[in-house]
Amino acid sequence: KIYAVLHSRRHLPQCCMQECASKFPLLFAEKAVYCILMSVSSPSHITVVGAGYVGLITAVCFAKFGHRVTCVDTDEKKVAKLRRGIVPIYEPGVRELLKTGLARKRLFFTTNYEDAFAIHHPQFVFLCVGTPPRRNGSADLRFLESAARTLTRSITQPTIVVTKSTVPVGT
């Protein structure tokens, strides 16, 4: 559904839809957002909530394609390291992408949601927070719910929100 709405607003050609569907192993609606971000002529402002493995990779890749990305995380030590170009995870190529994004002023890290939303006014927000399993096997959604509550208080303009966190069907 989101894909159809976004497609009609941006007038993406059919070939782009097919190319995106084959390139990105993501949910269908999320593929639409990636298609739009890769096809727009001017850079978008993006906020990524969570600077863990998924969030950091998402942030550095969008920065590489010219978008201005603000990554917000609650871990002050991690954010301080990322601001200095120190990568807290292992993934080939990420260190270089991080350093390039920082040097080109396309990549920013903060612990302050107000900075990430009210000041930078993102057009897209990617929620990339952990959803660890509980003892009974169900997903612990408290980090995602907290991020969503903060997001609703902080967003000041129309924004497309994409959940990259792993969640149960129907969440």
Image (spheres, rainbow, N blue to C red):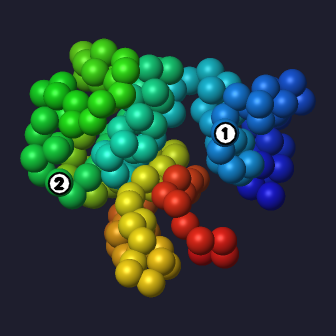
Residue that label 2 marks = 75
Rendered location of residue 143, percent (x, y): 35, 69
Q: Quadrant of the N terminus?
A: bottom right
Q: Quadrant of the C terminus?
A: bottom right
Q: Amino acid at mark 2?
A: Asp
Residue that label 1 marks = 25
Give the residue drawn at x 32%, y 46%.
52
* Earlier-in-chain disc, 2 versus 1: 1
* Mark 2–mark 1 CB contact (< 8 Å): no
Rendered location of residue 15, percent (x, y): 87, 24
In the image, taking residue 158 as reference, residue 114 lies left or right, namely: left
Farthest-out residue, bottom: 136
Within the image, what quadrant is residue 130 found in? Answer: bottom left
Q: Is residue 55 above or below residue 130?
A: above
Rendered location of residue 149, percent (x, y): 39, 74
- CA separation, marks 2 and 1? 28 Å
